[in-house]
Amino acid sequence: MSEGATSPYRRVSLWWDQLPAELAGPVRPALPGSMAADVAIVGAGLTGLWTAYYLLRRDPSLRVVLLEAEVAGFGASGRNGGWCSALFPTPIDKLAAASSREAAVALFREMQRTVDEVGTVAGAEGIDAAYRKGGTVVLARTPLQLARARAEVTDWHSWGFDDRDLRLLSQGEAHELLGATDVLGATYTPHCAAIQPARLVRGLALAVERLGATLHERTHVTSIEPGVARTGLGEVRAHVVVRATEGYTPRLAGARRELLPVYSSMIATEPLPAAFWERTGLRRAETFSDFRSLIIYGQRTADDRLAFGGRGAPYHFGSRVDPAFDRDAAVSAHLQAVLTDLLPDLAGHAITHSWGGPLGVSRDWFPSVGLDRDNGLAWAGGYVGDGVATTNLAGRTLADLIAGVDSPLVRLPWVGHRSRRWEPEPLRWLGANVVLRGMTYADRAEARTGKPSQVGRLVDRLAGH
């Protein structure tokens, strides 16, 4: 990375630390004053950038202005686990209840296609995002987890999916993919690619500029109103204003209870020797997790590190988002212990990076995308950490909505969904942290007793599952 104004961003994540100078900087000029546009997009993460990309691919004459409080890719888009997956956080039966069986299945099928779309666009735009479509293996390491794995496969097949979408692996098959401890079996889906997310988002920012978009960094939008995005440097008036702020949404005036900023944390090892990978697997860069309640996620990076993350950091009162919360020493130590428990051969190998950041969670864990034609306000978000591919689908959908195109995308069941707002404080703080601690307790109780945790079931209900 080049020195100077951009150097502090090396600390954002491993992914940022690996950026070459041409992707890392320099910082783009802030908004020079008030201006007009056809579409103003607030937030230059993947949601905002994909929206600009597809709008300008459709109509290069559009005046598209993106406003970013920090720099493009500063938020979750440049910090995440690097899973470009077909995961969608809302259970399929809940989607079907809100729409229809056919619509719910259509959304998940479109998510599967979206994984390939991201790789296709990255290739077409010359973005070296280290895209490797090796799928995902989710380990079952206790009899209870194995029962969950079997039930999940049976459930998905009941919706018309088959082994080409999700299949149960035997103990031997699972251990061949990932040589972790205590493996009893696993599920495997091919619908996921490991990526270097900062390369993707920063490369996409350059692509949208080539298409004609204007991107102003270090321009903090304070409020979004019909026809205008307001900043301390001026205002941008536009026919359509898109809110693409995800975990930073509570910083907008009047939006504190729209999305809950939940912190997720990651660590990364030093590059690991070939002998380690011969024993461990992940030969096709499969991403991996297991069936515990408190989510974990990992990948083998393009330079042979293990990048590993999980939830566990507390929610901060008043939906506060602050750089001081990005690193939590206790959570990082816990992640290292969990990773070493999975892969004891990591003992003695250095952890070189730790980082974290906020992601956005809607009250019903139901992401949404939409456009209010009466006031010109559009939005997308609430991905609950499953945003790398979902942002692409959001961008394509917003482009169709703004253009007035009646496509299959605009009829998917997340379009126009309205989640109720989160509770006021202190109920929000109490509920969010009870859910977090409940997941931790459920995992410990199940490990100790080998039986399903009643606390875990209660937590699922509290979380809106």
Image (tube, helix red, strand yellow):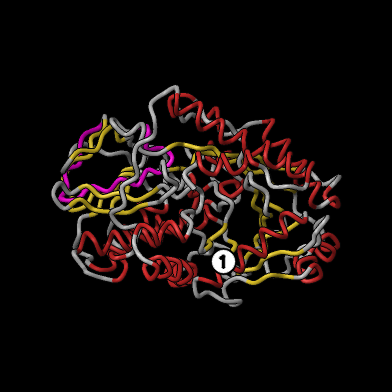
Residue 243 falls within the magenta-colored stretch: yes
- The spot of residue 59 in percent (x, y) is 22, 66
- The spot of residue 407 in percent (x, y) is 26, 71
Residue 447 falls within the magenta-colored stretch: no
Residue at 53%, 62% in the rendered image = 85
Decide which of 397, 50 is in the foreground and name it. 397
Q: Is 14 placed above or below 455 here? A: below
Decide which of 22, 402 is in the foreground and name it. 402
Q: Which residues are magenta?
A: 233-251
Decide which of 444, 299 is in the foreground and name it. 444
Q: Is 245 placed above or below 182 here? A: above
Residue 124 in view of the camera: yes
- The spot of residue 130 in percent (x, y) is 58, 64
Q: Is 292 placed above or below 204 here? A: above
Residue at 41%, 37% in the rendered image = 248
The answer to which quarter of the image holds residue 310 is top right
Label 1 Cα neighbours within 10 Å, binned few <14 / some 14-19 / many ≥20: some
Q: How many marks?
A: 1
Disc 1 secondary structure class = helix
Residue where numbered disc 1 is placed: 155
Q: Is 292 placed above or below 97 here? A: above
